Image (tube, rainbow, N blue to C red):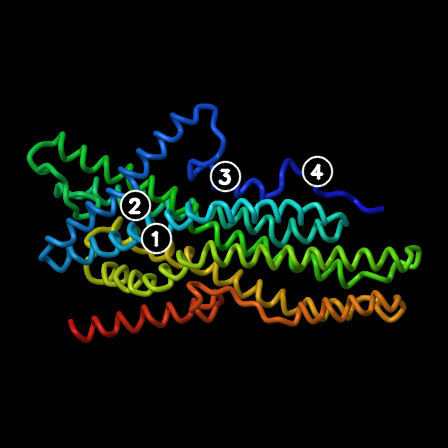
Amino acid sequence: MNIDWWSKMDSNVSYRFFWFCLRLLGVAEFRYKALARFYVICLTLFGTIYYPIHLLRGLLVLSVAEDFFKNFFMTLTTLVCSFKYFFLRLNLKNIRRVTKIYSELDKRATTADESKYFILRHQERADLIMKMFFLIYLGTNSFAIISVIVDEQQRLMFPAWFPFDWKSSSTLYWSALLYQFIGSNILIIQNFVNDTVCPVSLCLLSGHVHLLTMRVARIGYNKRKSQQYHENELRLCIEDHLKLLEAFKLLESSLSSAQLILYITSGLNTCVVIINLLFYSQSFYEYLYYVAFLFAITIELFPCYYYGNMLQEEFKQLPYAVFSSNWIEQSRSYRQDCIIFTEMALRSLTMLAGGIVEINLNSFFAICKTAYSLFAVILTMK
């Protein structure tokens, strides 16, 4: 007897994750919509827009190399975070459609082995990715503020420009420091949403592709079912495949621009963080901060490229699953549908960022090589 594992769950991870993202972006249904819009506008103006501007303007007036490197990586990070935020908001319609597709595919997992595989291999991993992102990002910011507080000199978290002289009084200093701390936390929350959309989406999508291969491979072996039943089951699997292709295209168009920017800037950002770690760290907490930031960059990149690579491999297994079914004993109509399905599944699918960069492990190692090359160049130039 089949066990409906999904009925024992409060809600599936696909729905919970994307609903959480929409709420953080300020687009979910609120009781007081006018107040919610005002709240989103304030966060966008004072966090997403002004925060990178005050860092960028401060960077342009710096003349000391140490201050420049300490400010540069954070300025670049906040600029990229803001761009990713706006790109994600522009593609919310696509993300809602992907959410709907995931909900439909979740209902297709009716057997115990399918549900168990998805829960253990993908749902728990997706939840782990979200928790890991959140803890690493908040930990990095905590080390940054602690390093400022324990420092004997009065300084900001990051060298930046303010429309007032923050050195003139303690009140102005603590106001500037408080703004930087709150603003960085706002950007962390936004970046948490931006960075988890890609790996969690690809994780769930690759899981559904694997579930489809499981369903296709067992068609035709139940002797108690008629040939017509197996034909209908194969056609339902073909419909699932079309939904997966639609979700693939929607995710590629939604994540393409943000991932291309991340790919271009990550190597440079990693290089600058290593420079700060090796040459400009002056306290134990600064060492911890730069190590945590370097780890955060790796966490930001690796899961997305890993699951992009896994998704590519799962799609490659689909044609083999078609011929693993008991197609020999089925009707002529079933075998014709098998041929059509196989031809559709043979097409190689690789998600691209900006239509240029493949989202797989090869691109991740290319970023690592870029960071090393830039670091070697800077060492040569001294």
Q: In the visual, does 292 lie left or right of 179?
A: right
Judged from the image, the secondary structure of the residue bearing numbered disc 3 is: helix
What residue is shown with label 4?
Answer: 8
Residues under labels 2 and 3: Cα distance? 27 Å
Q: First in sequence, mark 2 or 3: give its number.
A: 3
Residues under labels 3 and 1: Cα distance? 25 Å
> In the image, residue 106 lies at what x, y percent?
67, 47
Q: First in sequence, mark 1 or 4: give its number.
A: 4
Judged from the image, the secondary structure of the residue bearing numbered disc 1 is: helix
* Picture quadrant of residue 35: top left
What residue is shown with label 1?
Answer: 292
Foreground tag (3 vs 4):
3
Residues under labels 2 and 1: Cα distance? 8 Å
Q: Residues within 10 Å of mark 1 (few under 14, many from 20)?
A: many
Q: First in sequence, mark 4 or 2: give its number.
A: 4
Amino acid type indicated by mark 4: Lys
Foreground tag (2 vs 3):
3
What residue is shown with label 3?
Answer: 20
The residue closer to the viewer here, 83 or 204, is: 83
Amino acid type indicated by mark 1: Ala
Foreground tag (1 vs 4):
4
Residues under labels 3 and 4: Cα distance? 21 Å
